[in-house]
Image (spheres, helix red, strand yellow):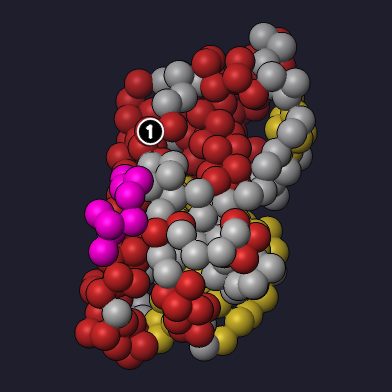
Amino acid sequence: MNGTTELLGTASFPLTGNFLAGRLRHNLSLDDLQYIEGLVESVEEHDDGARLLSRGIKTDRSTILIEGYIFRTIESGNKRFITGVHVPGDFVDLHGFALKRLDHNIDAAGKVKVGSVSHETLRAVMRDRPGVARAMWFATLLDAAIHRKWIQTLEQLDAPRRIAHLYAELHTRLELVGRGVTRALRTPFTQFDMADMCGVSAIHANRAVGKLRELGIAEIRRGDLYTNDWAALKRYAQFDPDYLYGDGPLKVKEDWD
């Protein structure tokens, strides 16, 4: 590892300092981190609900989330399904580099700040920087691991536990990127968003939120979750963080090279 944790983070790398933080970022050299920071070619801010990329539209760039939350969404008829949520540091659509067209939409959840990297630049990464390319490959595989867990929770857990699991996951993901949450985890999520993430109706989601309050585990108000005991919430949600690959799959620098 090169330098201190602070030198690897957003103080030195304001655009990409959260990328793979808490996972294998420490296995990347300072030169690699500087190179990744330089990949971002433009920075934009978007308001809540803005569609950053529509399903089926050919894309020539990928997006890294700098601030805020982003949803992956699928629309069928008049129904919306939220199939993923992103936090700062996530490369939201790296897989678009290979696929060119996505089978889902990329939408801002609240105000967001994002950076863009052209696919032409990513081709140079694949050719010239295999260590950086491998880190990006890891990021896409991490997306897949999270997606599999979401499918499992839809099958295995009831609605109150699904909502608890969602916030338990966000709590852990934010901790990994150095944005530790104490009592309140603040999000811009509406009741409809929670319903669309958990595969239930808005009425059912409201009842599930009420159940968490009745049990004394957590209270959710306007998307913000308040709890005095994150460990209890995670136990109730049957949350196991292994699928988030905290600290990365590799512990030794030599294994990464």
In the displayed structure, does residue 244 sit left or right of residue 221?
A: left
Task: Classify residue 177 as left or right of residue 133.
Answer: right
Horizontal side of residue 189 vs 118, given as left or right: right
Above or below for 40 versus 248: below
- 37 lies left or right of 9: left
Residue at 42%, 69% (x, y): give it: 29
Identify the residue shown where x is 45% and y is 78%. 31
Indicate the position of residue 13 as horizontal and vertical percent values: 60, 72
Secondary structure beneath dot 1 equals helix
Q: Which residues are magenta?
A: 249-257
Name the spot of residue 95 as percent of width and height, x first: 30, 67
Query: Could you say which is closer to the camera, residue 143 or residue 59?
Result: 143
As displayed, is residue 229 above or below residue 30? above
**The disc labelled 1 sits on which kind of residue?**
Asp
Looking at the image, residue 80 lies above or below residue 119:
above
Q: Is residue 166 magenta?
A: no
Q: Viewer-proximal residue, 80 or 185? A: 185
Residue 65 sits in which quadrant? bottom right
Residue where numbered disc 1 is placed: 242
Outermost residue on the top side: it is: 215
Question: Residue 192 is drawn in which quadrant?
Answer: top right
Q: Position of residue 37 (x, y in %)?
A: 52, 78
Whether residue 45 is visible = yes
Q: Position of residue 202 (x, y in %)?
A: 59, 34
Identify the residue at image location x=29%, y=79%.
129
Is 65 situated above or below 126?
A: above
Count of marks, rendered view: 1
Q: At x 26% / y 64%, what residue is drawn?
A: 257
